[in-house]
Image (spheres, rainbow, N blue to C red):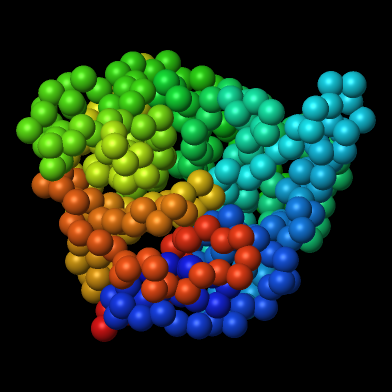
Amino acid sequence: MPWIALGDEAYLDIINNTVHKLNLTIPYDGHCHGSVDNLLFLTRGGSGCFMADPFSGAVHPVVDLALFLKQQTRKEMFSLNYYGRRLSIKKVVVDWPQGSSVEPVVATLLTNSINMHENTIFVCRAGTDTVGKKSYRAMSVDLWNVLDIAFFHGNLNAISTCGQLHRVEIRVPSGGNPVMTNVKELDTIGSPRRGSNDDYNEDKMVNLIAYEKIIPTEEAYLVESGDKLLKLNPWIMDSNPGKTVKFTVYEADHSIPLKWKLVRSLCGRALFLGRYGSNFKSVPVGDGHYCAQEDCIYFVHDSGDFGIYNVKSRKMMGSLVPDTEVLPQPQRPWIPTWVFPRSPVCN
């Protein structure tokens, strides 16, 4: 079972219900924006970006991303239309080369502080080597209303508010930096924006929890699960917007046009969801490695909304963590996030 990173020195072991302390050698002003597999993604003073292993202390700088953010900010400062616009990191995903010691490809979803509907996607390779600012044009693209991104079969996929899927095709030279070769807006049908009417009617007996109305949110999460690309839409209580009570799950049918199909099973897998930059990961269960329940979604949120949702039974499975009031509070800006030890063991 993965751990939840609660701060730079506090990690919650869910299986044993204990909090561990690990000394991670990172700058004091490093801010955590989430995680990727067993690595935390952090920024330093708004100028540095890096991934850090909380277990080994290894650090992977992402210099090109830091330089791109700095370049865009500087460009806006000298623009006649400058109103304090800033790009901020919403989601980070990586694509690890198979059987290679080359640094991974890093894709970042950036949001605009002035216009929340305008997004930028930037791809680069982790490491200290840079390609130069002139190359950044071929490594970035501006899109509208993007909610999430995920790698699938070597390409980067982006989901918009209307369920529309964009495919960003990337060419990755051996040892070189990635280049965007094409951006396709896929013809999509059956794209429920906030949960379909069919799903609502089918679930009408469970759509009232303690006689309270539940509503779908505007959020959508993309997750690669086995050989499938899934889209998850969370639902919340109308009277308590910070409380997730269910998810609807759709599978991408890659026929032409692309279709989103409602599914009632994760095919024996478990999903681990974070918030924004946090880890979204699908793992097989039943092999003694992760101690997770099959067909369940484990989720953590920076608001303290933690839980387990069973896709088959369509029910919440109780609390994921102990009383959050007794958990240690981080000493720096920190998003609770999943981290996966390299050798997960069930006790």
Determine the residue positioned at 38% across, 66% down.
Answer: 324
Q: Quadrant of residue 272?
A: bottom left
**Residue at the (77%, 58%) spot, across then down:** 45
Vertical side of 205 occupied by 20: above or below: below
Residue toward you, 269 or 300 = 300
Name the foreground residue: 39 vs 306.
306
Nearer-the-camera pick, 247 or 216 = 216
Q: What residue do we see at 7% from left, 33% from top?
A: 205
Up the image or down, 166 lies above or below 243; here it is above
Residue 309 appearing in the image: yes
Residue 313 position in % (x across, y down): 11, 47
* Residue for point 54% across, 82% down: 22
Residue 176 rendering spot, x and y as whole percentages: 73, 50
Q: How many marks?
A: 0
Q: Quadrant of the C terminus?
A: bottom left
- The answer to whether residue 143 is left or right of residue 150 is right
As drawn, 131 above or below 112? below
Tell which residue pokes out farthest to the left in this image. Answer: 205
Q: Height in image: 50 above or below 119? A: below
Q: Position of residue 177 (x, y in %)?
A: 72, 47
Q: Percent from the top left, x then y, of residue 282? A: 35, 54
Q: Is residue 239 left or right of residue 48?
A: left
